[in-house]
Amino acid sequence: VLAPVRQGGGWAGYRRAVRDLLLTVDPTLGRRASLERSLREAIGDGRLVAGDALPSTRALADDLGISRSTVVAAYEQLAIEGYLITRQGALARVAPTRLPAEPSPGRAKPGRFVPYDFRPGSPAVGLFPRAAWLRSSRAVMRDAADEAFDYGDWRGSPVLRAQLASYLSRVRAVAADVGAVRIYGGFFAAVSFLGDALRASGERRIAIENPSLHVVRQALAGAGLEVVPVPVDAGGIVVEVLETLDVGAVLVTPSHQYPTGVAMTPERRVELIAWARNHGRWIIEDDYDGEFRYDRQPVGALQGLAPDRVIYGGTASKTLAPGLRLAWLVVPAEFRRILDETTNFRGGVSVIEQLTLADLIDRGELDRHVRAARAVYRTRREALIERLAEVVWLRQLAPTSAGLHVTVVADELDEQMLVDRAAELGIGLFGLGPHWSGTPQQSGLVLGFTRPPRHRFDEALTRLVRYLTDER
Amino acid sequence: VLAPVRQGGGWAGYRRAVRDLLLTVDPTLGRRASLERSLREAIGDGRLVAGDALPSTRALADDLGISRSTVVAAYEQLAIEGYLITRQGALARVAPTRLPAEPSPGRAKPGRFVPYDFRPGSPAVGLFPRAAWLRSSRAVMRDAADEAFDYGDWRGSPVLRAQLASYLSRVRAVAADVGAVRIYGGFFAAVSFLGDALRASGERRIAIENPSLHVVRQALAGAGLEVVPVPVDAGGIVVEVLETLDVGAVLVTPSHQYPTGVAMTPERRVELIAWARNHGRWIIEDDYDGEFRYDRQPVGALQGLAPDRVIYGGTASKTLAPGLRLAWLVVPAEFRRILDETTNFRGGVSVIEQLTLADLIDRGELDRHVRAARAVYRTRREALIERLAEVVWLRQLAPTSAGLHVTVVADELDEQMLVDRAAELGIGLFGLGPHWSGTPQQSGLVLGFTRPPRHRFDEALTRLVRYLTDER
């Protein structure tokens, strides 16, 4: 039973959104949890907006007839969750930065709050190592020469490029030196610029795995390339099909195929490289989540086997945060000139941020963070798979123990209806459908397990499984 | 008389570059200044490289037979200048970040150290408000919601866009709201994307002032546009000539024409806007240094007069630092869709950095910094002009009291020889020549006055004036 709680005159003087706030106490939740939920909902549906001041804890406690410590605890919880900003001696305010987001695949309806969010594409941004990042910012502000603030090298700061060359060699077995590394403002920018460079070098067509991430296909198409889908089987992209095509390059995700989760077999790797070498073609390796393997040491990057033919792409978006907009390519010597010439003035990434990341890597903080995140993701992935076993009509595709998502499939599934109904219950889902080039060949869901906050993950799992069980 | 000073065994154990360092004492300079100069030269020509540890002050003092306090003072001076990093209890090291730089027009020979640098294009990067920036970074790391670290709005963070809309309206009389502002990774990226959008909307040709910044022409040409030069007279771009051309847009620098320094007259502004409105064409306003006017309040941006036809462009590169790679456009409603669609995935600027700049503006620190920088630049500009009066064969072009450069001209000048000989003496110059589209119509120099560090500015001026006087 939900009982409305009175609104009081103590709220006068605050903005309309706050004055009109209706708080309800759900006896099964208790007062504090009810208050938290009411505030979350008010922020989620826009009744409270960024910058709004909340009543003081004392005023709200008086007004609702509950103890002040309950209000304090609720505000604190919401601050931890990122809904509110609290500062000693000041009114709590609604946090300013709940940004609508693109092109993470799972963000169809920006701004809508989804408490049980299983959409893929982002890491657990709540894990971002804020203190370590700030420490590195401080070091940069203290130590950087004045010239660091001037126009820098357009290919990326030599300092970061050197750090990345060594990091990628160590962690992903990439063959890299400073001269090969390029820094861009995010992986989609890098892919766009690669597309431009391929066009400039006379190519018209590029192959891509089917299924694949739709925004990568869009970025390539936006550069004027015809994108040709090639099927993926249990070994990875089917090179036999690739052999029949007249394409200048192929974009693949060897360590953990997106979205199926297949890891490319050693045999297939050798075949793919032979194809590229025999025909003088380029392989673009999208190593988006290569750091996250749970059952064994990560398989090294394809690039290490053929640094002359593979353009390696990595990003800080999965290891640290998409908001940093940092990605890198390791480019074969023969492709560098055309890439640099085409990209020209379009690139340009903050030198300050590059030096900060370089310092973070140098201090071992990136490794430390990835280790910690890996432990969290492994646990979440296992819990998700265990609970999904209860949903008998779904089966997991290609269960490589890796990455930040699990793909499940089912025959004759109305994906869109499943996704839409879930949204009504605050459960965020994303279908397999948009990943197919042309006609979908299998229906399913790409389930990310990074988004629900830690304290709500079990509840989110329960709701997900109950929903999926009930729906069929 | 330069006397070589012995190298000692006390240096063993350091890197070769340091061991081989040859220190010379110039009696006219004294010991400390000689030591500083020797170290600067060793760093400048690469004998000492980033990360090299220097001998302890005690070891070096013993080794050279000079007092330790002299060595301490020299190290401190070089640390202030950004050559060295000194930390209590640790060996001094060569600073890691003397980056080669492009495409600032004056950086022809990256890596070469120029002690007396009058090349234009950058602000005084030594003035960068490191402490204030760090304070804002700390605020962002403390207050930002987790979602700030996720994929953000591709048009730019709404938080920064709101701050910029209000800043630009206040400081530059720009008519802007959040919806009109776009954020890009530097002004060259913004111009490239504008070029792409104009091409996508069917345009083939764009007009630009003659002379103009060559890298802007290159960015537009790189987008596939034919760039058509239009002469500039004492009132700004000659609209009569523009009227005769079939172009879809024009790029102008109304507040302080680059490089001539002309401020566009009110009459010319009205003419230009009438041209754009009558023919349905776009004006791109490059307001690169609009904040820096010294004799009066800055003239408001052209955009304020015609927000329907003017695409306003600004940047943090002159007010704060080019290394931030942050620029913005204020875009008329009618042009937004095509711009957003063409730019698509190519943009992408760190949300963290955007929120940091937003906080900096919010705290009034950007205004404070611009005020302080303006005072420094005004003094430097006056000193430069006063001393240049001694060089009788040069005359100043369009002496608007504004900006970060002074352009001087002379008839029958061999610019290249003048620039090359100066470089041999450590004086950085940049000719007017590269700014002309086609045949140079006037020879001269574009003199920036921001680069020499404060303690060396008078000496740099003296060397410049002596060189220019002697050369003719």
Image (tube, coloured by chain):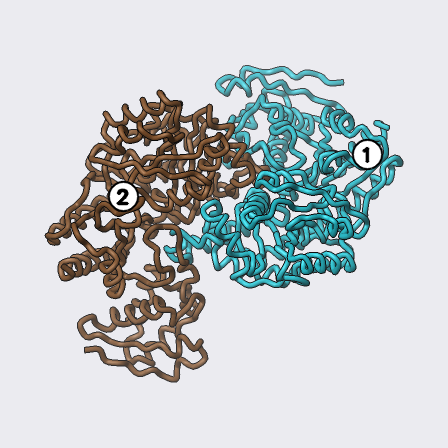
Chain colours: A brown, B cyan
- Foreground: disc 1 or disc 2: 2
Instruction: Tell me, yes or no, if residue B252 can be seen here.
Output: yes
Of B311 and B126, the residue lying toward us:
B311
Residue with the mark numbered 1:
B465
- Element assignment for label 1: helix
**On the image, which quarter does residue B452 sit in?**
top right
Q: Is residue B414 above or below residue A32?
A: above
Whether discs 1 and 2 lie on one chain: the answer is: no
Chain of the residue where label 2 is placed in the rendered structure: A
* Residue in the image at 67% along x and 20% along y: B24
Residue with the mark numbered 2:
A259
> Could you tell me residue A463's position as x and y percent?
19, 60
* Residue in the image at 17% along x and 61% along y: A467
Q: Which mark is residue A201?
A: none
- Element assignment for label 2: loop
Of A309 and A127, the residue lying toward us:
A309
| Amino acid type, mark 2 | Pro
| Amino acid type, mark 1 | Val
Chain of the residue where label 1 is placed in the rendered structure: B
**On the image, which quarter does residue B79 sit in?**
top right
Q: Could you give the CA–CA distance between mark 1 and mark 2, rounded to whole angstroms?
A: 66 Å
Q: Is residue A406 left or right of residue A174?
A: left
